[in-house]
Amino acid sequence: AHLRYQLFILSLSAVLLAAGYLVPNVILGLVLIGLGLTVLVGSPAATASSLQMAVPGAQRGKAAAMWLLVGGIATFAGPSGVALLQDM
């Protein structure tokens, strides 16, 4: 159930965000982007709960630590990678 919720949330937010950038009306675009971001806010909670339900009890701490580590590296490596590519 949690993975279906995650799929639904990400699909809905992708549609709302894409529509927000594609509509010609500025106000409607801002409303759609705001709705898309509002829907997207629930995504990390669903990911964490899905991870805890999918992993055996003895491995939950390690899985959560790896998830936080990868998330921390990704938030650092993303902007740094773009800056590196821009300097080339």
Image (cartoon, helix red, strand yellow):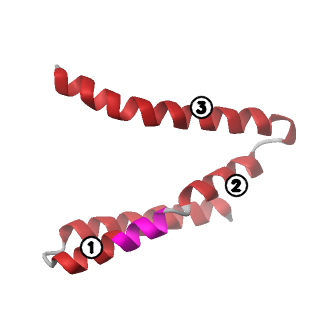
The first of marks 1 and 2 along the sequence is 1
Q: Is residue 38 magenta?
A: yes
Residue 12 higher or lower than 88, as above or below: below
Q: Amino acid at mark 2?
A: Ser
**As rendered, which of 60 and 37 lies closer to the eye?**
37
Magenta part mainly helix, strand or loop? helix
> How far across and how far down the image is residue 9, in percent?
51, 66
Where, quadrant-wise, is the N terminus in this rendering? bottom right
Q: Residue at x 33, y 34 (%)?
A: 79
Splitting the image into 4 quarters, where does residue 37 fall? bottom left
Question: What span is colored magenta in the figure?
Answer: 34-40
> How far across and how far down the image is residue 38, in percent?
45, 69
The first of marks 3 and 1 along the sequence is 1
Q: Residue at x 53, y 37 (%)?
A: 71
Tell me the residue that label 2 is attached to.
Answer: 49
Residue 51 higher or lower than 28, as above or below: above
Splitting the image into 4 quarters, where does residue 13 fall? bottom left
Tell which tag, 1 or 2, sits nearer the viewer. 1
